[in-house]
């Protein structure tokens, strides 16, 4: 029994001694850690820039087409054989020039007959009028019945009605005669001739097409850009101002919106030519940074700023007003320099602590 108590006491004393020694070692370790100098700051080669205030314009590139300011398809409402074609493709014509004539002999014959009929009917109306007026005087004197007076009045009205109908037929025939020849409606160029002498012209059949010498440019763009593309914006071609947007049509063609450009001057290109154009938006103010300083994340757009006091990188949310492949215009300006580089680099800079940087340059 005494031997067991002695062993227990020895175990307790040994455990106490070990505990005290462990505490002493732990305290010594803590003191060593506290006295250990901090690790030196990491030095990195990171391109930094200071934002600069400035202005930028959004630029949109499109494929456009040079078209005639006005173009028209010429046809007639008259059926008949074509007797003359007085224009060829590519020919310049002036307003009022006769381009096509259609056989009008039948119409002219009808007009001549109606004019003769008109002459006779005028005489008949005059005679019926004299008879009616004479019968009024006889009726008042009691020498004519009321029935005969009424009959003369109706005969006079009938002759007037026949005369009026002939006038209307004559006017219609002369109107048809106007369709027997086609004149140029404006100064321009004949684009295509689709009829020849001896062909049968029919109502609605296109006989010739023409355009004026003036030019305009038309381009198509996605409907989601409809708010950005509006009348008054400047359009450039080969780095030179081409003109301004005059109209943005309310209706789409093949799912694309259509804009029309009025030219500052004519282009030395044939109608129908394709040309690349750039549309510039209005100037906007802000701070300019390289586009590779902007980091796009799912929850927004950011820049990575370097906080020299804390020796670390911090993200700042921004609003981009204008962006090109080279530069971006931010709504916000920053006193701290911003990092720029690859997206992979910008994404991991915030994870570094105690960082010194070497390179700082201004945004151009």
Image (tube, grey):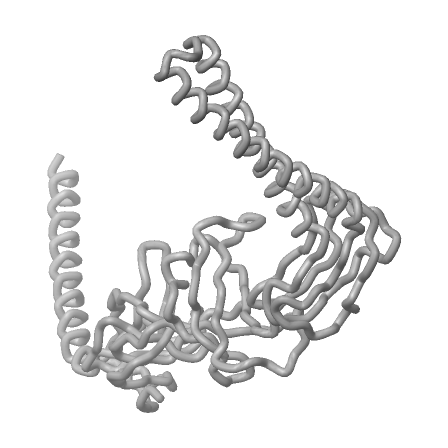
Residue 258 showing in the rendered view: yes
- Residue 158 location in percent, x, y? 54, 23
Vertical placement of 251 versus 149: above or below?
Answer: below
Q: Name the image quarter holding residue 246.
A: bottom left
**Quarter that holds the C terminus:** bottom left
Residue 31 pos. (x, y %): 13, 74
From the viewer's perspective, is 165 left or right of 259?
right
Residue at the spot 32% in from the left edge and 63% down from the top edge: 301
Residue at 54%, 31% in the rendered image = 127
Q: Is residue 48 left or right of residue 158?
A: left
Residue 187 rendering spot, x and y as whole percentages: 61, 71
Image point (55%, 27%), residue name: 159
Towards the viewer: 151 or 345: 151
Report the quarter where the N terminus lies: top left
Seen from this angle, which residue lies furthest right? 198
Residue 224 sits above or below residue 45 on the image: above
């Amino acid at each position: 029994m005494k031997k067991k108590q002695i062993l227990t006491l020895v175990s307790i004393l040994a455990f106490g001694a070990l505990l005290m020694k462990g505490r002493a070692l732990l305290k010594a370790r803590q003191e060593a850690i506290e006295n250990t100098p901090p690790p030196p700051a990491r030095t990195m080669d990171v391109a930094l820039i200071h934002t600069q205030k400035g202005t930028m314009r959004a630029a949109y590139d499109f494929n456009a087409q040079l078209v005639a300011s006005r173009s028209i398809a010429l046809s007639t409402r008259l059926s008949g054989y074509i007797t003359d074609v007085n224009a060829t493709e590519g020919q310049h014509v002036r307003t009022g020039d006769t381009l096509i004539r259609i056989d009008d002999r039948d119409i002219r014959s009808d007009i001549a007959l109606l004019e003769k009929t008109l002459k006779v009917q005028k005489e008949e109306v005059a005679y019926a009028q004299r008879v009616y007026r004479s019968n009024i005087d006889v009726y008042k004197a009691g020498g004519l019945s009321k029935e005969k007076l009424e009959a003369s009045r109706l005969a006079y009205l009938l002759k007037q009605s026949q005369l009026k109908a002939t006038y209307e037929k004559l006017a219609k025939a002369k109107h048809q005669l106007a369709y027997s020849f086609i004149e140029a409606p404006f100064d321009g160029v004949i684009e295509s001739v689709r009829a020849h002498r001896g062909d049968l012209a029919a109502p609605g059949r296109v006989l010739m097409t023409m355009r004026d010498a003036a030019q305009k440019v038309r381009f198509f763009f996605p409907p989601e850009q409809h708010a950005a593309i509006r009348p008054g914006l400047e359009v450039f071609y080969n780095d030179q101002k081409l003109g301004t947007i005059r109209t943005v049509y309310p209706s789409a063609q093949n799912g694309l919106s259509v804009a029309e450009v009025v030219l500052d001057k004519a282009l030395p290109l044939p109608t129908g030519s394709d040309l690349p154009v750039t549309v510039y938006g209005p100037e906007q103010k802000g701070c300019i940074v390289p586009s590779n300083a902007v980091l796009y994340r799912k929850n927004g757009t950011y820049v990575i700023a370097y906080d020299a006091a804390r020796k670390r990188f911090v993200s700042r949310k921004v609003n981009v007003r204008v962006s090109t492949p080279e530069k971006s215009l931010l709504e916000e300006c920053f006193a701290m320099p911003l990092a720029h580089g690859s997206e992979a680099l910008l994404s991991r800079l915030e994870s570094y602590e105690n960082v010194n940087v070497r390179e700082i340059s201004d945004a151009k």
